[in-house]
C-alpha cells in the first residue's frame, strides 16, 4: 500500500490524498507533526531534502512534490478510477497548458493570500494586508481570464476533467471558505466550475478528514 507522509490539514498532502481517492488507490497516511517541526528533523530531510510534506513511499520508491506524486499515481493506475491525464498528445498538451495556468496564474496568487489571512492568524500573527491586496489584484485579473475560458468549455483543459482542475482544490478551498467566496461566485462560469469540482465526493471526503 502507498504510504503517504504528511499532515491531514496540509494543502499539498490533501492533493495527494484526493488523487488516491479519485483513482481508488488505497493509501496509509503517516502523520508528520508540522507544528512540532518533525519535517525538519535530519531523518526526514534525508528523504525530503526541503523539509516539507508530502512524500510517498510506494513499496520503496520515494517521491516528493505533490504534483509529481499525483502524475505518478495517475500514470501508474491508468485503468482505474477517474482518468485524470489524457493520453492523446493534443489533449495531453492542453492538460499541461491548464496545469501551468494553475501554478502560475492561480496558486501563485492564492497561496500568499491564504498564508497571510488563514495560516498567520492561526499563530497569532498579523496578516500583511499590503501583500494580500497586491496578490488579490493579480488574482482577480487572472480570474477574469478564467471566466472567459470557462464560458467556452466545461473544464480548464477542455470539456473533460483533469488533474489540472483538481490541483486548484486545496488552496482554492482554503481561500473560498475564509472570506473570499465572492471572488469566485461573482464570476458565473468560474462559480459553476468551482461548484462542480469542489463537490466531488473524493474532495469532500479529503477536506472533511483525509
Ligand atoms: N511544492 C511542494 C510544497 C510542499 C509544501 O509547501 N508543504 C508544506 C505543507 S502544504 C509544508 O511542509 N510546510 C511546512 C514547512 O515548510 O516547514 C509540494 O507541492 O509538495
Image (cartoon, grey):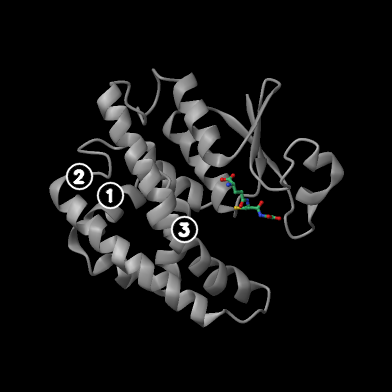
Residue drawn where x is 45% and y is 56% of the image: 107
For label 2, being within 8 Å of ligand 1 is answered no
* In this view, the mark in front (2 or 1): 2
Residue 133 to residue 109: above or below: below
Which secondary structure, mark 2?
loop
Badge 2: few (under 14), some or many (20 or more) residues near its Cα, within 10 Å?
some
> Answer yes or no: do the residues labelled 2 and 1 have beta carbons within 8 Å?
yes
**Dot 3 corresponds to which residue?**
108
> Answer yes or no: do the residues labelled 1 and 3 have beta carbons within 8 Å?
no
Horizontal arrangement in the rendering, residue 21 relative to residue 3 (left or right): left
* In this view, the mark in front (2 or 3): 3
- Residue 67's tag is none
State the residue in front, 154 or 139. Answer: 139
Residue 194 percent location from the top left of the image: 30, 55
Badge 1: few (under 14), some or many (20 or more) residues near its Cα, within 10 Å?
few
Horizontal arrangement in the rendering, residue 163 relative to residue 36 (left or right): left
Residue 167 percent location from the top left of the image: 43, 46
Residue drawn where x is 65% and y is 49% of the image: 7
Q: Earlier in the sequence, mark 1 or mark 3?
A: 3
Residue 32 percent location from the top left of the image: 73, 47
- Residue 196's tag is 1
Calculate the distance from the C-alpha at mark 2 to the C-alpha at mark 1.
Answer: 10 Å
Q: Is residue 199 visible?
A: no
> Answer yes or no: do the residues labelled 2 and 3 have beta carbons within 8 Å?
no
* In this view, the mark in front (1 or 3): 3
**Dot 2 corresponds to which residue?**
154
State the residue in front, 24 or 189. Answer: 189
Calculate the distance from the C-alpha at mark 1 to the C-alpha at mark 3.
Answer: 22 Å
Amino acid at each position: 500500500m502507498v504510504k503517504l507522509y504528511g499532515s491531514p490539514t496540509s494543502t499539498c498532502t490533501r492533493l495527494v490524498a484526493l488523487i488516491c481517492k479519485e483513482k481508488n488507490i488505497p493509501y496509509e497516511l503517516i502523520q508528520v507533526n508540522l507544528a512540532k517541526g518533525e519535517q525538519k528533523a535530519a531523518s526526514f530531510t534525508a528523504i525530503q531534502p526541503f523539509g516539507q510534506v508530502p512524500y510517498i513511499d510506494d513499496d520503496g520508491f520515494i517521491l516528493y512534490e505533490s504534483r509529481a506524486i499525483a502524475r505518478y499515481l495517475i500514470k501508474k493506475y491508468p485503468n482505474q478510477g477517474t482518468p485524470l491525464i489524457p493520453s492523446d498528445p493534443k489533449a495531453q498538451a492542453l492538460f499541461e497548458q491548464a496545469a501551468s495556468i494553475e501554478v502560475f496564474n492561480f496558486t501563485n496568487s492564492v497561496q500568499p493570500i491564504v498564508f497571510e489571512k488563514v495560516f498567520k492568524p492561526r499563530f497569532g500573527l498579523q496578516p500583511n494586508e499590503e501583500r494580500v491586496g497586491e496578490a488579490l489584484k493579480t488574482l482577480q485579473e487572472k480570474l477574469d481570464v478564467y471566466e472567459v475560458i470557462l464560458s467556452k468549455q466545461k473544464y480548464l483543459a477542455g470539456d473533460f476533467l483533469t488533474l489540472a482542475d483538481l490541483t486548484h482544490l486545496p488552496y482554492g478551498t482554503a481561500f473560498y471558505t475564509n472570506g473570499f467566496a465572492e471572488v469566485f461566485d461573482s464570476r458565473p462560469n468560474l462559480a459553476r466550475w468551482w461548484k462542480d469540482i469542489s463537490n466531488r465526493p473524493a474532495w469532500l471526503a479529503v477536506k472533511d478528514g483525509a
